[in-house]
Image: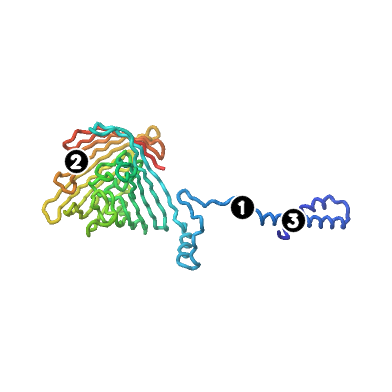
Amino acid sequence: MNRAWRCTCLLMFVGPFALVAQTPNSADMTETIKALLARIDRLEKRVADLEGTAAPAHVEAPAVTASIAQPTTPSPQPPPGSHDDHLAATEAAQGTPQSPLLKLSGFSDIDFSATDQHGTKSGFNEGQFTLHMASALAPKVTVFSEFTMTARTDAGTGSPPAAGFNAEVERIVIRYDQSDYFKVSFGRFHTPINWWNTAFHHGAWLQTTAARPEMVQFGGRFIPVHFVGGLIEGAVPAGGLHLNYNVAVGNGRGSIISRAGDAGDINNNRAWLVNLFVKPDRLFGLQAGASLYRDKIGVGSRNFDEWISSGHLVWAKENPEFIAEFANVNHTETGRLGSFNSQAYYVQFGYRLPEFGQRWKPYYRWEYIHIPSSDPVFIGVQDLAGSTLGMRYDISTFSAFKLEYRNQRRPGLPRINGIFAQTSFTF
């Protein structure tokens, strides 16, 4: 202990005696001070002994954030003056952590269905379990991924037994944001070939309805839902129109046309697409646009040129909500005359009622798909004409209940009527 602290303690002990002392006997006062100083010395020694021999009361647990546990041992630090040290200092000055922090959000749903289709059973089923993960690597560099688990109908069968769920990396994207006008991404995307496919991702809570339109169904074959490659995007004011663009080059469809070329392109021809749309300032909530997609795909030993053209008109406000999309898929076999054109469209209308805290939202969707029976690429894909009438009730900010009646008709098959219920949520 330092001398100032000892003098302070001495004054605390001596002060009261000095104030009340009535005798001028300095010898007695001197003896008292010596005794007090000796006592302070003994107390200091005892405290020092205790501090040197006492064991720690507890061990600190490693710090854990809401999403990532920090390492229990210190990370190696770069040498002073190195490039890494300079970069870390720059990022710290700009507010970016030296170690990336992962942010998680999740989605899931539980469904019930009952139809009059022959051979089907009514009952509950577990919907997709979805995780969205995002991390900032630098002020203008971000990574986003989407991971799903889907229940399998063949779980436990086969040898070895099939797993209970299919795990899938739906999206993994690293993006460099130069500015609002120019952004570059690489990875696995939801193909920006129409509006729904990039507005509503995995997680049924995100969309008004319980299910996606048939033309953009996950696992469907009409359009390539996923795309692996590079994407350039941005927005230009354009006199208040806010012209947005997407230009992408990648692998296109895989050997199974319902899947993307995740492990590489199946031929030496890249797929590409261009998507343009406007979002006018004067009509906030309106979006209109068109897309063009080009690929070369293989079916067995035969090769086909594929052109997909699409357009959309959307009023994104919920009073009302209006979504309309159309797509034409053209297939032409290489080296042969003749081509095949398949069309699909849907129109969806919804309105959030102002009463009851705006929790109720009735909606209706009409959808149609026509595919020539002679198209060798879409063999097995059936025509469809269907209606969906439903009601969404938002239980809370993060959960919703949906009830739908669906009526579907396919060529040569009986009309199917069904009731579908879903509770969907995010966390």
The residues bearing labels 2 and 1 have C-alpha atoms spaced at a distance of 74 Å
Residue at the farthest front position: 159
Image check: 325 left or right of 111?
left
Amino acid type, callout 2: Asp
- Residue name at image x 57 percent, y 51 percent: 59
Q: Give 269 or 11, whichever is nearer the viewer.
A: 269
Q: Position of residue 283 (x, y in %)?
A: 31, 45
Q: Position of residue 425 (x, y in %)?
A: 38, 40
Q: Are marks 2 and 1 in contact (CB under 8 Å)?
A: no
Quadrant location of the C terminus? top left
Colouring convention used in this rendered image of the protein = rainbow
Which disc number belongs to residue 383? Answer: 2
Numbered label attached to residue 48? none
Residue 211 percent coordinates (x, y):
30, 40
Residue type at mark 3: give it. Answer: Thr
Does the image show residue 340? yes
Tell me which label, 2 or 1, sits earlier in the chain: 1
> Which residue matches tag 3?
8
Residue drawn at x 70%, y 55% as measured from the top left: 47
**Comes first in the chain, label 2 or label 3:** 3
Q: Secondary structure at mark 2?
A: loop
What kind of residue is marked 1? Pro
State which tag comes first along the sequence, 3 or 1.
3
Looking at the image, residue 411 lies above or below residue 301: above
Q: Are marks 2 and 3 in contact (CB under 8 Å)?
A: no
Residue at which label 1 appears: 56
What whole-number distance in Å separates the C-alpha atoms at marks 3 and 1? 30 Å
Asked which secondary structure carries label 1, the reply is loop
Distance from Cα at disc 2 to Cα at disc 3: 94 Å
